[in-house]
Image (tube, rainbow, N blue to C red):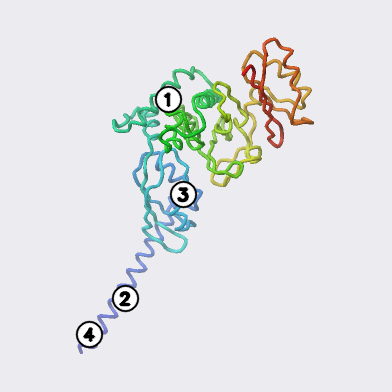
Amino acid sequence: MKKRHFILKGIITALVLIVLFYTGRWAFFNIFHRQDVVDGMVALRTNVMHSMEDGNDSDIFYVKNVKIKDISDINKYVDSAFGSVDTYRVLVSSGDYLAIQLSFDRSENYYVIRKVLFEEEIPSDKKKALAMYDSYIEFYKTCIKEPMSDFDKEKAAHDYLIKNCVYGFPEEQQDAYDAYGVLVSHKAVCDGYAEAFFMLMTCLDIPCDIVVGTADGDLHAWNQIELDGEWYNIDLTWDDAVPDMGEYVKHTYFNLTDDTLAENHTWEREFYRTCTDTDMNYYVKTFAVFDDFEAYKKGITKQIGRSDVLEAIVYYMDTDRPDLSFLYDSSAIKKLKYLVEDMGEYYVIIVYVNT
């Protein structure tokens, strides 16, 4: 009798476990039929960046078609000036579906942006954020004269950062990779340039992203920016000459299409915006585009006296060492240096006047 009772009890327990298993499984999969399920790493990256931007310390994401090994290396995909992923936990894993919890390490940039856009006070212990905020206010008072177009604001930020920063490493070398290195230490590498530009554009309410890839085979960072509904690539690091040229600023990499930038840059394009428009390219916008060198000779002289840097696109040249002696016909030019940059579709000629 006891034996039969024990067997019956075992059968009942097994049935209960089966019901619980399938009930729980149904509830679990019901979660993954909700609209907030994130499909793929590209979408997860976007959601993570938005969560950090909103100031969350941590967040839970329901995802599919993302591998756990990619979650463990998620900072490779998340290029946010607001911070980075600190830790992760896989809460549930079933087939192609995951429930994950991510905690975030908030950057100093976050506090500056929140102060400018929402008047949220910067905590007193965030010394770097306070210093960067002061630098932003100096930039705004010096360079922004409302009303200005977004293009003009972009140029103001581009030129300000390049004039006030030297490519290299400050005393605290880690600062070279942050906006602080550009805005306060005035020495930085590409990561710092990209973060600082992102910060200024975001504070000016102009949509901007950071892009991570390679340039001439080396790891590199730059930006994408939205103007009048179109996205463009802009690389401040490659517009800042080495050795440094001080007040002399060029705009070779100011608002390029993907195809033009791809001449010497590579990146995983599916993670970023598509840039195909040319309307806001610096040279298009400033009417400094010439079909050939003869047209360039006639047109470039109109820039003399307006700037210490004469810049233009020339679509066809039969030499990479153009004869610029005609510029000495102007009494305003005593000496010059020049640079020719091959951009694939066209050449950019940069003339530094009276350096």
Tag in front: 3 or 2:
3
Mark 3: secondary structure:
helix
Identity of the residue furthest to the left in this view: 2
Q: CA distance from mark 3 to mark 1?
A: 31 Å
Q: Quadrant of the rendered structure where residue 71 is?
A: bottom left
Q: Is residue 118 left or right of residue 220?
A: left
Q: CA distance from mark 3 to mark 2?
A: 38 Å
Q: Which mark is residue 136?
A: 1
Mark 4: secondary structure:
helix
Q: Earlier in the sequence, mark 4 or mark 3?
A: 4
| Label 3 Cα neighbours within 10 Å, binned few <14 / some 14-19 / many ≥20 | many
Q: Quadrant of the rendered structure where residue 176 is?
A: top left
Q: CA distance from mark 4 to mark 3?
A: 52 Å
Q: Which residue is mark 3?
A: 44
Q: CA distance from mark 4 to mark 2?
A: 15 Å
Q: Which residue is mark 4?
A: 5
Q: Which mark is residue 15?
A: 2
Q: x, y (%) of residue 67?
A: 47, 58
Quadrant containing the C terminus is top right
Asked if 301 appears above or below 17 in the picture, the reply is above
Q: x, y (%) of residue 119?
A: 35, 27
Q: Is residue 287 left or right of residue 158?
A: right
Q: CA distance from mark 1 to mark 4?
A: 78 Å
- Labelled pair 1, 2 in contact (Cβ < 8 Å): no
Tag in front: 4 or 3:
3
